[in-house]
Image (tube, rainbow, N blue to C red):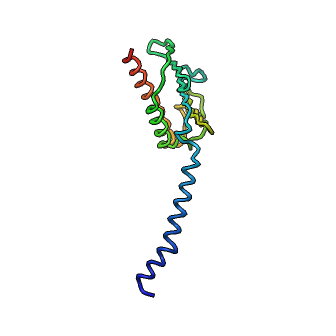
Amino acid sequence: MPNRSKKIFLLLSIIVPFMLYCLYYYGMMVKNAPYKFAEFQSIKFEYGYGDSLLNKYDSKTGDYQFVNRRDSVVKMHMKLTKDDLLYLHRKAADLGFWDFPEKEMATRKVRSPRYMIQFNYKRKSKTVVFEDAFEGNEKLIDANQRLIKELQKVLEDAEARQKNTK
């Protein structure tokens, strides 16, 4: 068999079926992904010390409550834009939020901030409770802290936009 015929045979019998299988397999994975932005409904973000999570935001209702610098609770109504929500969805996906354990609590009793992050979709929701004093994998702690900073930044930007429009 000539060399060219061997290459064509190899291409048709091994490489093409492998490529078709990969397209089918990964196509089904993407199609059945549990956390798609098309099915996105809302984000809940709460944080504070201990069990009193006084700082809260719910994108479904737009209710935003936070403690200001003078230790007084401020309540307001604030909606995030679709771009803000898409940005947070993608940031969570980039940081691997869907693979985080549900509870990341400190083993020793220390007064540290506690965060509750919840992404709600039509078919599923993912909730993570994270304490700053958590002593686990450094990469996991870093990913949690980065997601929290992004959530806080988006909320601060939305609050500034709302103040500028008034």
Q: Quadrant of residue 157?
A: top left
The image shows residue 54, relative to residue 140, as above or below, that is above
Front-most of 134 and 4? 4
Residue extending farthest to the bottom is 1
Q: Residue at x 51, y 20 (%)?
A: 64
Q: Residue at x 59, y 48 (%)?
A: 32
Residue 66 place in picture, x, y as percent: 50, 18
Residue 74 place in picture, x, y as percent: 49, 14
Residue 116 place in picture, x, y as percent: 56, 30
Residue 19, visible in the rendered structure? yes
Residue extending farthest to the left is 164
44 relative to 150 in the view: left or right: right
The image shows residue 32, relative to residue 148, as above or below, that is below
Front-most of 54 and 164? 164
108 relative to 71 in the view: left or right: right
Q: Residue at x 54, y 50 (%)?
A: 30
Q: Quadrant of the C terminus?
A: top left
Residue extending farthest to the right is 123
Residue 146, visible in the rendered structure? no
Front-most of 23 and 108? 23
The image shows residue 30, relative to residue 150, as above or below, that is below
Q: Quadrant of the N terminus?
A: bottom left
